[in-house]
Amino acid sequence: MSSKSRQVFITGCASGFGRMLTSAFLARGWKVYATLRKLDERRESFVEEQGKWGEQLQLREFDVTNESQRQSLVEEFTETGLDCLINNAGFGQFGAAETLSDEQFRQQFEVNVFACLFLTRDLLPALRSKKGSIVFLSSVLGYSGVPLTSAYCSSKFALEGFAEALYHELAPFDTRVYLIEPGGHRTDFGTNTSWGQLESPAFAQHTNNYKSFLAKKLSAPGTPPQGVIDKIVKLVHSRSKRLRVPLGSDAKQLYFLKHLVPEWLHHRLLHSVFRGMFWREAAQ
């Protein structure tokens, strides 16, 4: 099958990985269904791509938590099938667990887990018919818990469990599943976060320390995101049988600690890191 006849569905294409993946797959000849919220407000930013790629780029208004929008988009692939689904949309809900409201925990899971799960489930017949690929944008925090990110970590841990089960479930149908686990890359993810709404004096200093740490990370050069994009494109085209793909030096180091170092040593090493990130000033 030529690339020109292939179709990829990407969520969260307004910026970051989603926007870059849209350009990368267009350049490889795929027909790209790029979805995003508030399309009318953002359509102008895609004028150049639409002028260059024409009908090859299909922009769609899509809130991943909207069931009616999901069903409408799924119907488009009932007859044609789908070659690749990239679950990229998501956000970070940060803060100590006791500062997060019920609604904040639920919203974290609605966007990062349930929306992804339902969309993938509904598109499985179309993906199976083309022996397609499913890509989940997870995180280094999908296999390594970090203080003040319990909501986000748990959502990514849940996503990884779903993807791993699906990896084995779809193996008889030659339908691939990939978990992309980036560490810190220079995208706008850090600006797409919210913090706990409830008061907790015990964690006030820890939270300030973490916010300062993140601000420094955002102002530093960081790891270019292009490596993540290139890896996803390569995996989909090569039909690799890998499941988990940690990307970035921090992600690979934590993956090594998680899988090859005894658990007691793993946690002791992480505590020394967290002491510098969260605890030092709070203890003074």
Image (tube, grey):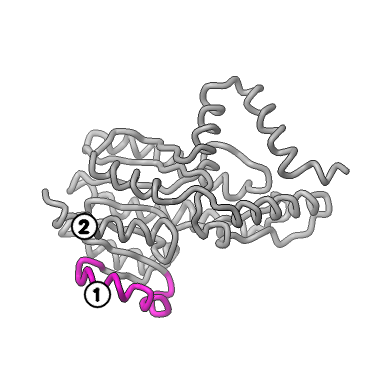
Name which residue type carries label 1: Gly
Q: Nearer the viewer, mark 1 or mark 2?
A: 1
Q: Amino acid at mark 2?
A: Trp
The residue at which mark 2 appears reads as: 30
Q: Earlier in the sequence, mark 1 or mark 2?
A: 2
The disc placed on residue 51 is: 1
Q: Is residue 63 above or below residue 124?
A: below
- 253, above or below 205, in the image: above
**Residue in view at x 72 percent, y 55 percent:** 99
> Residue sitting at 40 percent across and 41 percent down?
179
Which stretch is magenta?
37-57
Q: Nearer the viewer, residue 94 or 55?
A: 55
Count of numbered circles on the image: 2
In the image, 140: left or right of 71?
right
Is-magenta flag for residue 251?
no
**Screen quadrant of the C terminus:** top right
Residue 250, quarter of picture: top right
Residue that extends furthest to the top in the rendered view of this protein: 262
**Residue at disc 1, secondary structure:** helix
Residue at point 42%, 48% (across, down): 137
Residue located farthest toward the front when viewing the structure as drawn: 221
Most extreme residue toward the right, as rendered?
284
